[in-house]
Image: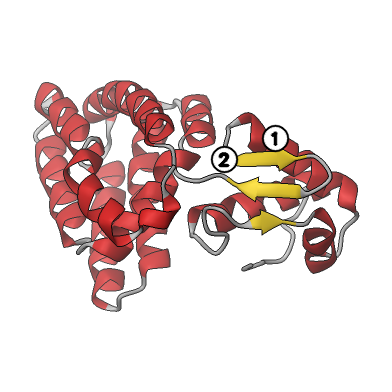
Amino acid sequence: MKTTEKEKNESNREYALRILRNNIINLELKPGTMISEQDVADELNISRTPVHEALQELSNTKIIEILPQRGSLVSLIDMSLVDEAVFLRATIESAITEEACLKATDEDITALEENINLQEFYHSKNNLDKFMELDNAFHEIMYKIANKMQCHYMVRTMNIHYDRFRELRLHASDPSTIIEEHKSILTVFKQRDSETVKGLILKHLNRLYVDEQDIRKKYPDFFA
């Protein structure tokens, strides 16, 4: 399990939740892996209570299964939950991006351009972790422009199922397609064509259905 230092003002529960969530998404904790509260507590140098609370919170999103007397299990990928996460994100984010397109300043557009340049750089270095971080940041910028960060928090909470699938997709296919789609979105965004950019975002977020069968063939044991 990959760990980082606890952030300033971060509670032990928040710390455990962040570390567990990140490790589930980046597949350090693979689907079907058993998790011991005590092992996680020891690794993070905290008590078991905040780890227990974090696992309970993750179980509410169905990414973790609590097995009495046995521990906690990282759930297998359930495509119905991925589908629901994509539906929520696409519905909200298409509207967010449409609004952001009309509100964006020159500085906002520069931030999006710089983000894509960094995506290309880290793709050339085959740094998938950094690429995923920048992919997320590209979309987060839209929420910031529209001043809808509470919507971003809500989508991010549910999005854990989709994020895990996206991580598999990065390992199974060339991320250059994602970069090209981001470039197309930005081109239309700069033209203030809010209706077209909304359609591009919907197509971009629904790309998983193009890749699903290839990913299932490569990682059959990860799926329910």
Q: Residue at x 16, y 34 (%)?
A: 203
Residue farthest along the bottom direction in this orientation: 125
Residue 161 in view in this figure: yes
- Find residue 62 and report its horizontal and vertical position in percent: 58, 34
Please determine whether, in this image, residue 49 is positioned above or below residue 122.
Answer: above
Image quadrant in which you'd find residue 124: bottom left
Mark 2 lies on a secondary structure that is: loop
Q: Quadrant of the N terminus?
A: bottom right
Image quadrant in which you'd find residue 121: bottom left
- The three-letter code of the residue at mark 2 reads Ile
Instruction: Determine which residue is flagged by label 2.
Output: 63
Q: Would you say 16 lies left or right of 75 here?
A: right
Instruction: Determine which residue is flagged by label 1.
Output: 57
Mark 1 lies on a secondary structure that is: helix
Of the image marks 2 and 1, the number of the one nearer the N terminus? 1
Residue 11 in view in this figure: no
Q: Residue at x 26, y 70 (%)?
A: 123
Q: Single out the mark in the foreground, 2 or 1.
A: 2
- Find residue 41 and report its horizontal and vertical position in percent: 83, 59
- Find residue 29 and report its horizontal and vertical position in percent: 57, 60
Alpha carbons under labels 2 and 1: distance apart = 10 Å
